[in-house]
Image (spheres, grey):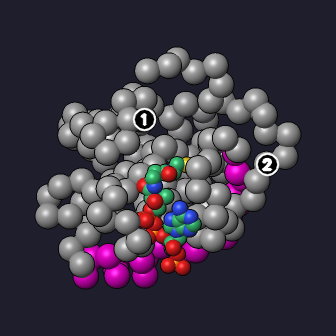
Amino acid sequence: MPDMLVSLLNLPPVSPILDQLSESGIVIRRANTFESTSIREFIELHFSKSWADEVMPCFSRQPVTLYIAILEGKIVGFAAFETTCRNFFGPTGVAEIHRAKGIGKALLISALNGLREMGYAYGIIGGVGPEEFYRKTVNAALIPNRTPGIYTNLLKG
Ligand SMILES: CC(C)(COP(=O)(O)OP(=O)(O)OC[C@H]1O[C@@H](n2cnc3c(N)ncnc32)[C@H](O)[C@@H]1OP(=O)(O)O)[C@@H](O)C(=O)NCCC(=O)NCCS
């Protein structure tokens, strides 16, 4: 799984996307520590147990390094940063029935702004799946000599 590099210095503006989503009742905001159980359950149900584990460090930070998307009081997507490695974005995911509405992009840019606020100038998108999504939304580029990445010799099951 490749890693990608993204400049945090010229991220696309997120406000217009947030405004557009809010017209459909979707709110993007930082998670709270007291929501960690609901968030972990959402990630485990829609994605995997290992992703639910991976976001745990986010809740030990102030501010929490995790953004969520909410519709009618329920979580529909998430984006984490500073989880397994410093300066890394991910994991992220949007519930399948809510994809292709701009939620993934809004979560991504919000989280990358979070990395920028921590003082980083560039961010790393770790263990990328949909390269084209990152290229298209934030102009990310593949990092050369990227093997082995951070996700190697993994436990099975
Ligand atoms: C990747 C993911 C988070 C995108 O969420 P989403 O809410 O559907 O994405 P958006 O609606 O914000 O898409 C923004 C743009 O990226 C494009 N895009 C979205 N997913 C894409 C993909 N897999 N490949 C290429 N382009 C993609 C959209 O077409 C859209 O383009 P547009 O602005 O021209 O309309 C979602 O598909 C997902 O949860 N995937 C499974 C988990 C995963 O792979 N996470 C990433 C691990 S590195």
Residue 93 on image: x %, y %: 41, 52
Q: Amino acid at mark 1?
A: Trp
Rendered position, 106 above or below 154: below
Write down the quadrant of residue 134 in the picture: bottom right
Please give the range of residues in magenta: 3-23
Residue 21: say if magenta.
Answer: yes
Determine whether the beta carbon of the residue marked 1 sits less than 8 angstroms from the nearest atom of ligand 1. no
The C terminus, quarter of image = top left
Residue at the front extreme, as displayed: 157
Image point 75% across, 59% down: which residue? 141
Q: Nearer the viewer, residue 34 or 74?
A: 74
Work out which residue is located at the far right of the displayed protein and give it.
Answer: 145
In the rendering, at what x and y percent does residue 152 appear? 65, 25
Q: Is residue 157 visible?
A: yes
Residue reaching furthest to the left: 72
Q: Quadrant of the N terminus?
A: top right
Q: Which residue is mark 2?
A: 143
Residue at screen point 64% across, 19% down: 153
Pick the front one: 25 or 115: 25
Q: Residue at x 24, y 37 (%)?
A: 41
In the rendered structure, does residue 31 fall within the stretch colored magenta? no
| Residue type for callout 2 | Ile
Dot 2 crowding, Cα within 10 Å, few <14, some 14–19, many 20+: some
Whether residue 46 is situated above or below residue 6 in the rendered picture: above
**Dot 1: what SS?**
helix
Q: In the structure shown, which secondary structural element does the residue marked by tag 2 occupy?
A: loop
How far apart, in angstroms, are the residues tagged by discs 2 and 1? 23 Å
Horizontal and vertical percent for residue 43? 32, 41
| Residue that mark 1 sits on | 51
Mark 1 or mark 2, which is nearer the start of the sequence?
A: 1
User: Residue at the location (27% across, 40% down)?
Assistant: 45
